[in-house]
Structures are given as C-alpha cells and as structure tokens.
Image: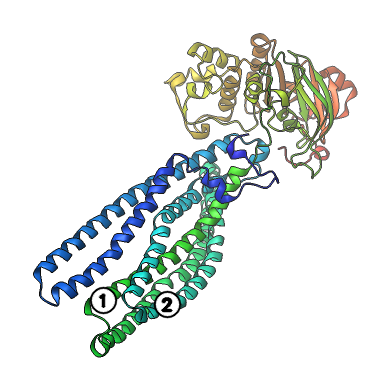
C-alpha cells in the first residue's frame, strides 16, 4: 500500500499534521534553514538596540567621536547581517512552502487518479477543485508563516524580554502587565475568528460548483435563456462568502487598534517612569531608556505577529483537514498482491452477484445475477430506466466491486487481475464518455498510445467515424474543444467507440453508446463489429430493440434482476416486458419505457 493510502492500525486516518508533513520530502533542508536564518535575523536585531545604548552613553553623551564610529560600524554590521539572514530566510521559506504545496497538489491528484468510482462519489467535483486550489494555497501560506513568522515572533519576544530585564528589571514589569492583557485580548479575538473562518472555507465549494456547472453547461443555459437565473445563483453564493469573510475580518482587524493602544500606553508609562529614574533616581541612562523603547516595540509587535499566526493557522486548518481527507481516502479498488497479468478469453460469468453503491446500507442495485456469456458472443442488454444496466457492465471492468458473489472474465475473478491489464482487455464506452482538448488523433490514442494513423483510420471506419472526419478540412488533425463541444453527440459517440476499438479488447461494452446516431449508422456499426472483431465479446446496452435484436442473446433487466435472457424470437414469445417494448417501438414508435415500467435514474 502506498504512503497516501496508509492508515493507522486502529483503522483511523493518520493525523492531519503527520499526513501532510510526509509531503515536505525534498524540501526538508530549506524547511530547516528557514527558521535557522530567522533566528540569526532576530539575534542581530536584538543586538542593535543594545549597541545603540552604548553608542549614546559612551559616544554621543561624552562627545567621543571614536566610540561613535566604533559602535556605529558595529550597528551597521548587525544591520547588514540581519538583512542577509532575512533575505536567505525569505528565499528558503518560499522554496520550502511552494515546493510543499506542489507536492500536496501532485499527491492529491495522484490519489484521485487511483480512486474507484465509489471513492469519487464521496466528493463533489467542485469540492475537489477547491481542495486542490484554495485549500492548498492557504496551507502553503500557513507553512511559510510557520517557518518564518512562527519562529521569528517567539524568538523576538523572548530575546526582547531578556534584554529588557537585563537593562532594567523594574521598568520591564510594564511589559509583563501589557503582555498579559494583550495575550488575553488576542486569545479572545483568535477564538472568535476561528469559528468564522471555519465557516468561510466551506462556502468556497458552493462558489466553485456554481462556476463549474454554469461554464460546462453554458450552451444549455443560453438555450433556455437562464442567464439571469444563473447570475442570481452565483451572486447569492458569492454574497454568502462575502458576508462570512466580512464577519471574520471585522474580528481580526481589532488586532491593530488593540495593539496600538497597548503600545502607546507602554510608551507613555515607559517615558514617565524612565525619565524619573534618569533624573531623580539616577538608576537609568539615556541610552538604556532609548533601547527600552526599541524593545517594547519588539515585544508587542511579536505578540501581534503571533496573533496573526494563530488566525492564519485557523484559516488553513479547515483546508488542511479537507486535504488530508482526500489523501487519507483509501481506494476501494486496488491491485491484488500477485495479480493475474493475462486475460485468456472474453468469457464472462456473473456468479450470483449482488451489488449496492453504498456498502452495508441501502437497497441492492443488482440482486442475485447469475449469467454466463461465451467469448465472442454479442449480448444485447435492455430494460427500463433504473433497472441496473449500467451497474451490471461496470462490474466487468471492475469500476465497482460486487457485494456478494463474483464476476469472472476468462474464468478468472476480476478482483485477481491487474487493473490495467483488465481494463485494457475490457474496453468500455460509457454513457457519459467525453472527449478531451486536443486533436482527433490525440483522443483516439487514449485507446492505444502508440497507435499509427492507419490503425486509427481502421478503428474509425469500424465505428463509422471516418464518414465525418474526412469532411473536416484538417481531417484527423482537427482540434477538439474541451468536452468535445465542437462535434455533435453522434460524432462524439463514434469517436469514443473508435477509441475503445483501438485497444483490441477481449470484451467491448457499449453503454447506450449509439443512442445519438441514426438507425442506419447504428446498423453499419453493428455490421462492422461482426466483421472486424468477431472474436470479441460484445455487450450492447441500447434503448432501441433494433440495436439488439440481431444479437446472439438479449438480456432483459427489471429492478436489478434478470427478467429474461434469450434470443429475439425466444423473448418475443416468452417475455412480457420485451414483447411490450417491441410492440411499443414497432407500432407506437415511442420510447421503450412504458409508464408502469419506469424506475429511478440509471447510475
């Protein structure tokens, strides 16, 4: 099992921090050097007020030019050293945080690619996009802040307090009172902001979902003149996000005025008491008082930075948990330890198969399916909406796993095959197959990466796709838009069939994949299948009787159960559902779904 699928022996997901920390990988050295540089920067900054006090007391006050030059040069060296450490810390921090974010995105993307359909069903598309973009960016910013500010602020605070007490313990008590007061106030602000920001980032999914749905379905939106409705829906999601952000930021902005209040009070108190010690008691020098002013600013600013760190960590914590959910999600379907690497034939056996999309709950989608299909047979599958047709064929290429029973291809349980080997030999043209941005050739070669032009042309002839490809000015180099939006539904289906044929599969599954082509083209495709791939087992889910009536056998499904299985003639004689569908289509010319046969949506 890979690292991203690892879980504790208790069965609970590995902790969020541990899970994400594993993706620092090659950026461990910059992650170590960043806080080291920040420590160097803080040390040099703390030296400057100390040296400045000596410059005033030993150089300026007595009028000693040599001491002024000496301590001035030391201050200059400290300033340049602090600058150098700061620059290096920034560079190392940027490298570590951006590299960490890149590893997270790659890790999430690779994990998602290994998901089964059941895993993907647990997350919305918009949610996954948000996790890959906004959530990772927030974690990246938080990580950089942890490496830099989370090191710098505590070190500055501790160092400044030490220097203050070393300079004058009595005056330093002012800082202690201010620190306690400011800490309590900032703690309250962070607690209130945490709740608000947790709500904010759950709303990003709504905004992304609205954008994705609208853009992908823009043609439908325009066809139904629903632009105003979609604008209203997006505006509502954006407005909700805006309101939550404003509520959260209203709390966070209290940091600055509160900080300034404490700073000014401390300066006034320090000026009053410090002047008294210089003039009346003579226990403090002018240079020491000057350095105390520098330290008070360092102490209080470090507290403000710490409060901002807590806010940033709060903002990123929700994102970190969401990222960890994706990384911790174990694929339901994985390769066995010693997988079978060869599919011997196209025989398909369903051995008393029961299947449900939600394991352990809900009604079974398929119930006690017992079928045996010989290699090279053409099997038609027909049935009402929600009868389980797509669910049935999804089990053959192991897009889902059965709950009970077994599915065998070539006499071997599909759970014993190497997934890549199985899916290369069981080629599926899904109900919702899509084309990708690129040329027609690029899309065809998804079926076979090294396919020659001649092989692609042969596959397209079998799928009757050559008829329209040859009419394009650029032929097979014609550009396809994302999702195949610049070709018709029938053309898209034929390209998807050709892509599947390039695999030269043992089993070919067409899940209602000729619904958008005319009956004449459908007949040509079926004729080509008989001639070009006679040894391939073909399973054809169809809405039209004419698409399956010349199949070797036809399977009739109803409510996830086998209602009939035989030839066209046998079913017409013995199966009521098939006979009703046939009569409806041949005499009434309508869809095969009669009013009393309709069920839920096909998945």
In this rendering, is residue 167 above or below 88? Answer: below
Picture layout, residue 152 above or below residue 409: below
Residue 78 left/right relative to 438: left
Residue position marked by numbered label 2 in the rendering: 176
> In terms of depth relative to the viewer, which is nearer, 511 or 489?
511
Mark-to-mark CA distance, 1 and 2: 18 Å
Residue at 45% x, 50% y: name it.
Answer: 140
Give the color scheme: rainbow, by chain, secondary structure or one colour.
rainbow
Q: Position of residue 510 (x, y in %)?
A: 67, 24
- Give the class, few, some or many, for how many residues have Cα within 10 Å of label 2's Cα (few <14, many ≥20): few
The image quadrant of residue 46 is: bottom left
Q: Quadrant of the C terminus?
A: top right
Nearer the camera: disc 1 or disc 2: 1
Task: Tell me if residue 411 comes above or below residue 147 in the rendering.
Answer: above
Q: Which mark is residue 288?
A: 1
- Which of 527/99 is in front? 99
Q: Could you say whether the residue bearing mark 2 is in a helix, strand or loop?
A: helix
Dot label at residue 371: none
Q: Tell me the quadrant of the picture where the N terminus can be found.
A: top right
* Residue 377 rendering spot, x and y as whole percentages: 75, 14
What crowding class fits label 1: few (fewer than 14 Cα within 10 Å), some (14-19), or many (20 or more)?
many
């Amino acid at each position: 099992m890979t690292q991203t699928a690892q879980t504790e022996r208790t069965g609970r997901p590995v902790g969020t921090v541990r899970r994400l920390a594993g993706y620092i990988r090659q950026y461990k050295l910059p992650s170590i050097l960043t806080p080291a540089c920040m420590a160097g920067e803080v040390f040099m900054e703390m030296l400057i007020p100390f040296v400045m006090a000596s410059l005033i007391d030993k150089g300026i006050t007595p009028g000693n030019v040599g001491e002024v030059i000496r301590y001035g040069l030391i201050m200059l060296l400290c300033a340049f050293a602090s600058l150098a450490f700061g620059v290096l810390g920034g560079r190392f921090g940027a490298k570590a945080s951006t590299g960490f974010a890149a590893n997270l995105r790659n890790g999430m993307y690779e994990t998602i690619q290994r998901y089964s359909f059941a895993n993907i069903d647990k997350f919305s598309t918009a949610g996954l996009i948000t996790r890959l973009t906004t959530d990772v960016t927030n974690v990246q910013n938080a990580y950089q802040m942890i490496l830099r500010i989370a090191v710098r602020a505590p070190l500055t605070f501790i160092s400044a307090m030490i220097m203050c007490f070393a300079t004058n313990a009595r005056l330093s008590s002012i800082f202690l009172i201010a620190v306690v007061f400011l800490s309590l106030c900032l703690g309250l602000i962070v607690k209130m902001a945490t709740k608000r920001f947790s709500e904010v980032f759950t709303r990003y999914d709504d905004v992304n979902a609205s954008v994705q749905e609208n853009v992908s379905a823009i043609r439908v939106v325009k066809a139904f003149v629903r632009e105003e409705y979609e604008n209203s829906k997006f505006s509502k999601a954006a407005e909700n996000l805006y309101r939550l952000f404003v509520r959260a930021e209203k709390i966070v902005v209290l940091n600055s005025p509160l900080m300034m209040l404490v700073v000014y009070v401390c300066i006034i108190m320090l000026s009053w008491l410090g002047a008294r010690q210089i003039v009346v008691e003579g226990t403090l020098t002018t240079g020491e008082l000057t350095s105390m002013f520098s330290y008070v600013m360092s102490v209080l600013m470090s507290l403000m930075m710490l409060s901002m760190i807590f806010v940033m960590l709060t903002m990123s914590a929700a994102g970190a948990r969401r990222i960890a959910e994706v990384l911790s999600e174990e694929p339901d379907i994985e390769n066995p330890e010693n997988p079978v690497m060869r599919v011997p034939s196209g025989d398909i056996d369903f051995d008393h198969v029961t299947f449900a999309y939600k394991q352990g709950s809900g009604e079974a989608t398929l119930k006690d399916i017992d079928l045996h299909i010989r290699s090279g047979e053409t099997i038609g599958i027909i049935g009402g909406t929600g009868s389980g047709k797509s669910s049935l064929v999804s089990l053959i290429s192991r897009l889902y796993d059965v709950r009970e029973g077994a599915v065998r291809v070539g006499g071997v349980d599909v759970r014993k095959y190497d997934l890549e080997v199985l899916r290369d030999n069981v080629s599926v043209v899904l109900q919702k197959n899509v084309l990708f941005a690129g040329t027609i050739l690029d899309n065809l070669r998804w079926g076979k990466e090294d396919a020659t032009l001649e092989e692609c042309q042969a596959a397209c002839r079998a799928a009757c796709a050559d008829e329209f490809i040859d009419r394009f000015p650029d032929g097979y180099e014609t550009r396809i838009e994302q999702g195949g939006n610049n070709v018709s539904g029938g053309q898209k289906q034929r390209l998807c069939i050709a892509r599947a044929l390039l695999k030269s599969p043992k089993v070919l599954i067409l899940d209602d994949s000729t619904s958008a082509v005319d009956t004449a083209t459908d007949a040509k495709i079926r004729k080509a299948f008989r001639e070009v791939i006679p040894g391939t087992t073909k399973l054809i889910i169809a809405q039209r009787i004419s698409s399956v009536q010349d199949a070797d056998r036809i399977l009739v499904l109803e409510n996830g159960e086998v209602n009939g299985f035989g030839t066209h003639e046998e079913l017409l004689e013995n199966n009521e559902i098939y006979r009703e569908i046939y009569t409806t289509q041949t005499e009434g010319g309508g869809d095969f779904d009669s009013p009393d046969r309709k069920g839920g949506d096909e998945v």
